Every structure is written in structure tokens, then in C-alpha cells.
Amino acid sequence: MAFITTTVTEWAPVFADERCARSLLQQLHRTVTHHQLSLAAYVVMPSHIHLLLGFREIEKLSKVVQQFKSLSTRQLRPLLPPNLIEVFHRNARFQFWKPRFDEVIIWSDKQFRIKVDYVHRNPVKAGLADEMADYPFSSAGDWLSDRPGLVPVDKEWLWLDDSDD
């Protein structure tokens, strides 16, 4: 399992636009399905996304994230408001996402639970929702109220090592 964060260039608040947030989640669903990943938790914030993804082969993490970023850029570009388009032009190239992403490999159930909580608290902490389960671009509803989110999640992730509980 990996905790992944990737950010829009210049922290532009693209996903404050509901169409863009939904488009990103549609691409996330396609990516998870295509690569047969386990999506345990997600949240789309105005300028970035946090994911908890399970991989059969963790060495494919970088390739999968780069592919997701590339495909989501193609989906999102036509939806971007004109005032934000110029933010993404760099050296005659269009660069929607920052080139890198952050990842933390999750090794235990305790670490996993901490990251799920962090993901779901993010919108409340940022003032985007009063309650975690109320934020529509998050898996919190799946976890806290059994209300399906926009992308199916795997809440049955099993750990080989629970020794640090």
C-alpha cells in the first residue's frame, strides 16, 4: 500500500471546479480498474490529491502515477477556465501537474489507519466541509456512513504484519 500525494502546478485550485474534480475521479477509477489496484482512500482537494493505493507489484507505482497524471491532464485540459490556462504553460509546454509526486509506503495497519484518517480530515481542516463524510470528492462517505463515493474503495485491505498496533 502506498500513500500518494500529487499537486497541480503552482497549487492552482483547479479542483474547486466540480467538473474538474469529477473528471479527475473518473480517470482515477479507470486507472485503478486498468491496473487492478486497490484504492483504499482518496480525497481531491482544490489543488492536489491524496490516495491510498494497493499494488500487487509496488515497483510499478511510479509508472502508474505518471500514467494517471498524463491521462488526467488530457481529460482536464478542455475543462480548465481560461484564466488558469496560462499557469500551466512552461517553456512552450503544457504542464498541469508538478513533475514529481510524494509517496510513503504503508507497512502496517496502524500506519494505514493514520493515513485514512488524514485523507478524510483534509477537507474539514481546510474549511471545505463541516463533516468528513459530507465532502463529495472523498472516500470518507464510504468509510464513515456506508454511502458510496464517486469511486469504489476497498475497505477490506488485509495486513501481513500487525505487530506495531
Image (cartoon, rainbow, N blue to C red):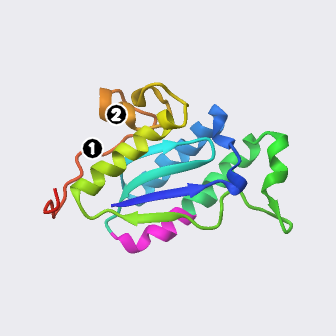
Magenta region, main secondary structure: helix
Name the secondary structure under disc 2.
Answer: helix
Q: Nearer the viewer, residue 2 or 30?
A: 2
Instruction: Give the Cα distance between marks 2 and 1.
Output: 9 Å
Q: Which residue is mark 1?
A: 155
| Residue at screen point 32% across, 62% down | 106
Question: Exactly how many numbered labels are in the figure?
Answer: 2
| Residue at screen point 75% across, 42% down | 80
Magenta span contains residue 60:
yes
In the rendered image, residue 76, in percent from the top left (x then y), is placed at 68, 46
Q: For the residue carrying disc 1, how many other residues have a C-alpha within 10 Å: few (<14), some (14-19), or many (20+)?
A: few
The kind of residue tagged 1 is Lys
Stretch in magenta: 57-66
Looking at this rendering, what residue extends furthest in the bottom direction? 59
Q: Which residue is mark 2?
A: 142
In the rendered image, residue 161, in percent from the top left (x then y), is placed at 15, 64
